[in-house]
Amino acid sequence: MDTKEDKKRSRDNAKLAGTSADTVRRYGTAVKEHAVSYSGKDNDTGLELERSLKKVSLYRRGNPETDPNYARVTKNQAGFSAEIKEAARQRAEQAIRSRRPYTRRTDDIPGHVNDQLFDLSKAVDKNGNPVPGASCQMKFVGSTPEAAVDKMLSGGYEKYLKNDVKMMVPKDYFPGMHKALDHKIASLEGQIKSLQEQGKNEAILAKYNQLDKCRILKKNLLRSQVSNSEALEARNHPMLSTGKDIARVAHRAGTHQAMIGAGIGSGTSLIRNLIAVYKKEKTADQAALSIGGDTANAAAVSYASAFSGAVLKGMAQNSGSQFVRVLSKTNLPAYVAVSVLELSKTMKAFFSGKITGVQCVEGLGEKGYGMVNGAMYAMIGQAVIPIPIMGALIGSMVGYTLSTASYNALLGSLHEEKLVREARIRIKRERNESFQMMKQYREELQRNIRMDLSQKQQFFNQIFIEISNAMRIGDVEKYITSMNLLTRYCGGKVLFASAAECDALMLSDTPIGF
């Protein structure tokens, strides 16, 4: 059976899963945007794209061995893939920043298929037309940055220069194109100066016209998030290209949540181990090792829950099933990831012979029950305490602890060998009734908290903002003052009122009572 340490870690893991809701929500929506770019269908909004990466990859381009236009056609089609990928990456980034994705290809704006000036737009006016300042044309042309500049200064691109259109180019070409334009501008300025000295006014006018084009192009040049090689990969291997983007987003989600998890894990472990040292249950060295282990575990679990949760949420959010899409709006994906981790530990112990089959089933039931209730209480906690992470953290802790205790109590009753059938039925009935009572009590608790603790909630919100600001700017005195206000409000006794008093207390022989 699980040890006390194992159960403590399971509770901590449930708590960490509860705090990842915001990260999974934002990065999961970003994952969905990349999935949509591949399939071309956004089931969440009902939007169907004019082109998708999968669709472009099926375009004809001839035989690579016999068709002389094969390379040119492939590069043109890669340009379409670059547009789709750029829009997906921008929309994903907007979702990560908690903004509703708003970048669109003009082909996906009604009435603007094959728009004459713009390929991408971040805004439309009241008539549904792309706003020039928020729109751009994408050009993945030329075999080199210099060749791309020459191409974009040619007659075929005159309309973009005359209309002052922003031009987005491959990220690997952008620096070279800037350098090539600087060289052309300097050369033309030198030629104009020489012609002025010679008095050739007609030639000067032509050079000024070329100079204006170079300056307009340089001013309007934008750097794409997509390189030439990425555009070609998206054309030839759309699923691989999409998978790489999804993996990058999920890794960012995991890394972000790992930092949060490490902070929560180390803080919780610090308090727990300080108490253990104070009670002489651990030495200082043992406590330090325990804190390090708890921090590493919290970071790893947080990374896994956010990475897997973001991928699961993104795929579920774009599922063809409405029921699955509804589930994606909860924090279920993160709990699924952590539940798999927790349940795999029990299965490993069973297959290694450390526990019996009965104990395996009991362990699976306890952890599964605990995780489900942890998820429920995390949502309640976040709703009741609308402080990012804090509400879900408290809700997960309470939910997992109460549900595990309830499960173990009921399981112990069912294990009584002399329990008669009538008593067993009664206990099962009472268990079901207790679930209903828990639901009623939860609803009553929410009402009471909303009615009676609004002032306390406002105080905690404000004091945590002050603490956060103090930590952000490194204001120790403000941090101590805020923490003392919190201590007094909760009925505690402050130990010091300033950094100087803290130093003096630490250096003195006076024992510190908790």
Image (cartoon, rainbow, N blue to C red):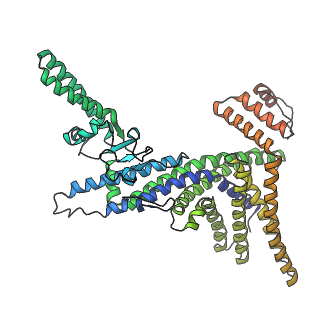
Is residue 170 something one can see in this rendering?
Answer: no
Res 70 quadrant in image? bottom left
Query: Total marks drawn?
Result: 0
Considering only vertical position in the picture, is 506 above or below 428?
above
Considering only vertical position in the picture, is 236 above or below 479?
below
Considering only vertical position in the picture, is 293 above or below 417?
above
Q: Is residue 110 left or right of residue 413?
A: left
**Which x, y percent locates residue 280?**
83, 47
Which residue extends farthest bottom?
421
Residue at coordinates 74% horizontally, 51% vertically from top-left?
384
Residue at coordinates 63% horizontally, 59% vertically from top-left?
330
Res 435 quadrant in image? bottom right
Which residue extends farthest top?
197
Residue at coordinates 25% horizontally, 29% vertically from top-left?
212
Which residue extends farthest front?
127
Q: Is residue 411 left or right of residue 340?
A: right
Query: Which of 314/285 is in front?
Result: 314
**Which x, y percent locates residue 437?**
82, 66
**Which x, y percent locates residue 235?**
32, 58
Query: Which of 407/123 is in front?
Result: 123
Is residue 264 something one can see in this rendering?
Answer: yes
**Which x, y percent locates residue 473?**
64, 30
Q: Quadrant of the C terminus?
A: top right
Q: Quadrant of the N terminus?
A: bottom right
